[in-house]
C-alpha cells in the first residue's frame, strides 16, 4: 500500500440529514407547483355526466311551471288523475303508493304530490300494463263541477255543534281508552254509540247548549229518562249488571268481568245514578256502554252470527235495548229517529257514518281487533 494514498472521507450524519431535507422539500415544492398548474388549467375538473333522464326531469319542471297548470278550475281533474294513478301503482308497489298518499294528506300540496307520482312513473316505463293504464287514466278522467264543495259529504257533520262535540269528546280520550283497555272493546266503537246519543242533544236551539255545552265544549250529561253521556237507561244498567254475574246467560262475558260494576253501598239505585250522572267524570258512562255492546256481540257470536264488524248493527241494538237483540242472519239498521237541523237520521246510521268517516281518527283509530272476546 502506498504511503501517499488518501483514505475515503466519511460523511457526517448531520450532512446526510440536511441533504435529505433538501430533497424532501424539493419534492413537495414540485408537487404543489404541479397541482397549482393543474387546477389553473382545469386538468383536475370532473367532467361529470348528464343524467339519462334529464329530458324527463325537464319536462316535469316545464309542466308544473306553466301558469295555466295552476288553474284552480282544473284542480278536481288533477286530483282525480293523481288518485287514480296511485291506485294503479298500489297493484305493483303498495309501499310507494302509501307513501305518496300519506304525503298528500299531510301536506295537501297537489303539485308536489304529482311530482312524486311522475318520478315513480319514470321507473315504471318498462311495465307496459302499468304505462297503458296511466295513459288511459289521463284520457278518461273528466270531471266538471261549477263550484268547489266544502265541508263533509255527511251533512250532519257540517253543523257548528259537531265541531264543539269533537273538542268535547277529545277531552275524554283518556277515560275512553281506559275503559277500552279494561273491557277489550275498540275505543272507536264506544265513541260511535256516544255520537248517536250526543248529536241529538247538541242542538243550538236548546237552552243547555247555549248556556253550557257550546261555550264550555263539554258533553251533555242526561239525568232523567236516560243517564250519563251515553244515555244508559236505569233498567238497561240493571240488565248489564245482571249479565255480568249470570254465567248461564248468553250475554255472559266471563268471570273476569263479573265484579266490574259492583256497588260499595246498599243504596244501589242511588249509587248507580251518581256514577252515571257524574258531570266531572264520565268513566262509568263509557264502562256501561262498552259492556253493553260487548254483551250483545257475545250473544250473537254464541248464536253463530258475527256482528263484531258491524258497528251499525251494534249501535242499533244498543239503542233499542236487550229485548230487541234477536240474533239472525240479516239484521236491520235503525233505532231511534234523530232530527238534526230538520233532517232525520237513525241512531244506527249516525254511528255507522261516524265510524267510517275518518273523523277523530287520530284520537280513535281502527284497531285490528274490535273485541277481544276469544279470551273471555
Image (spheres, rainbow, N blue to C red):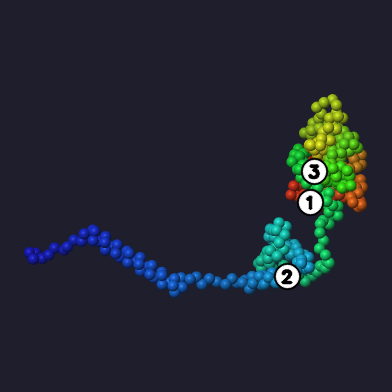
Quadrant position of the C terminus in the picture: top right
Residue 305 location (% of width, % of height)? 86, 45
Residue 49 location (% of width, % of height)? 55, 71
Residue displayed at 70% across by 58% down: 107
Label 1 vs label 2, nearer the camera: 2
Residue displayed at 87% across by 47% down: 203
Q: Nearer the viewer, residue 306 or 141?
A: 141
Quadrant position of the N terminus in the picture: bottom left
Q: Residues within 10 Å of mark 1 (few under 14, many from 20)?
A: some
Q: Is there any visible trace of residue 190 in the rendered image?
A: no
Q: Which mark is residue 359?
A: 1
Q: Secondary structure at mark 3?
A: helix
The span from disc 3 to disc 2 (Cα, nearest Å) is: 45 Å
The span from disc 1 to disc 3 (Cα, nearest Å) is: 21 Å
1 or 3: tag closer to the N-terminus: 3
Residue 158 location (% of width, % of height)? 83, 54
Q: Secondary structure at mark 2?
A: helix
Residue 67 location (% of width, % of height)? 71, 71
Label 3 vs label 2, nearer the camera: 3
Residue displayed at 82% across by 26% down: 265
Query: Which of the 4 quarters of the picture holds residue 84?
Result: bottom right
Q: Nearer the viewer, residue 310 or 58?
A: 58
Q: Which residue is mark 2?
A: 69
Q: Which residue is mark 3?
A: 216
Q: Is the residue 242 above or below the residue 43 in the image?
A: above
The span from disc 1 to disc 2 (Cα, nearest Å) is: 32 Å
Q: Nearer the viewer, residue 80 or 291?
A: 80
Label 1 vs label 3, nearer the camera: 3
Amino acid at each position: 500500500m502506498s504511503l501517499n494514498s488518501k483514505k475515503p472521507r466519511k460523511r457526517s450524519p448531520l450532512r446526510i440529514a440536511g441533504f435529505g431535507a433538501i430533497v424532501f422539500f424539493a419534492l413537495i415544492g414540485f408537487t404543489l407547483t404541479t397541482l397549482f398548474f393543474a387546477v389553473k388549467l382545469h386538468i383536475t375538473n370532473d367532467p361529470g355526466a348528464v343524467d339519462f333522464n334529464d329530458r324527463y326531469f325537464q319536462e316535469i319542471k316545464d309542466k308544473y311551471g306553466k301558469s295555466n297548470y295552476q288553474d284552480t278550475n282544473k284542480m278536481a281533474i288533477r286530483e282525480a288523475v293523481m288518485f287514480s294513478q296511485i291506485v294503479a301503482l298500489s297493484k305493483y308497489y303498495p309501499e310507494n303508493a302509501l307513501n305518496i298518499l300519506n304525503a298528500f294528506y299531510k301536506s295537501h300540496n297537489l303539485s308536489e304530490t304529482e311530482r312524486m307520482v311522475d318520478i315513480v312513473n319514470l321507473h315504471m316505463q318498462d311495465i307496459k300494463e302499468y304505462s297503458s293504464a296511466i295513459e288511459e287514466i289521463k284520457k278518461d278522467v273528466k270531471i266538471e263541477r261549477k263550484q268547489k264543495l266544502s265541508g263533509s259529504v255527511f251533512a250532519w257533520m257540517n253543523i257548528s255543534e259537531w265541531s264543539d262535540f269533537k273538542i268535547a269528546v277529545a277531552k275524554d280520550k283518556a277515560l275512553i281508552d281506559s275503559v277500552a283497555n279494561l273491557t277489550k272493546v275498540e275505543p272507536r266503537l264506544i265513541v260511535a254509540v256516544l255520537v248517536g246519543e250526543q248529536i241529538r242533544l247538541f242542538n243550538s236551539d236548546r237552552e243547555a247548549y247555549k248556556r253550557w255545552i257550546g261555550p264550555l265544549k263539554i258533553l251533555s250529561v242526561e239525568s232523567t229518562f236516560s243517564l250519563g253521556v251515553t244515555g244508559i237507561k236505569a233498567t238497561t244498567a240493571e240488565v248489564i249488571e245482571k249479565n255480568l254475574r249470570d254465567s248461564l246467560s248468553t250475554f255472559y262475558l266471563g268471570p273476569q268481568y263479573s265484579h266490574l260494576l259492583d256497588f260499595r253501598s246498599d243504596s244501589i239505585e242511588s249509587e248507580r245514578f251518581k256514577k252515571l250522572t257524574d258531570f266531572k267524570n264520565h268513566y262509568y258512562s263509557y264502562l256501561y256502554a262498552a259492556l253493553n255492546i260487548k254483551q250483545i256481540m257475545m250473544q250473537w257470536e254464541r248464536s253463530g252470527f258475527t256482528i263484531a264488524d258491524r258497528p251499525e248493527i251494534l249501535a242499533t241494538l244498543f239503542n233499542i235495548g236487550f229485548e230487541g237483540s234477536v240474533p239472525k242472519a240479516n239484521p236491520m239498521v235503525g233505532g231511534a229517529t234523530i232530527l238534526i237541523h230538520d233532517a232525520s237520521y237513525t241512531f244506527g246510521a249516525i254511528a255507522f257514518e261516524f265510524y267510517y268517516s275518518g273523523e277523530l281518527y287520530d284520537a280513535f283509530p281502527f284497531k285490528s281487533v274490535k273485541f277481544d272476546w276469544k279470551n273471555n
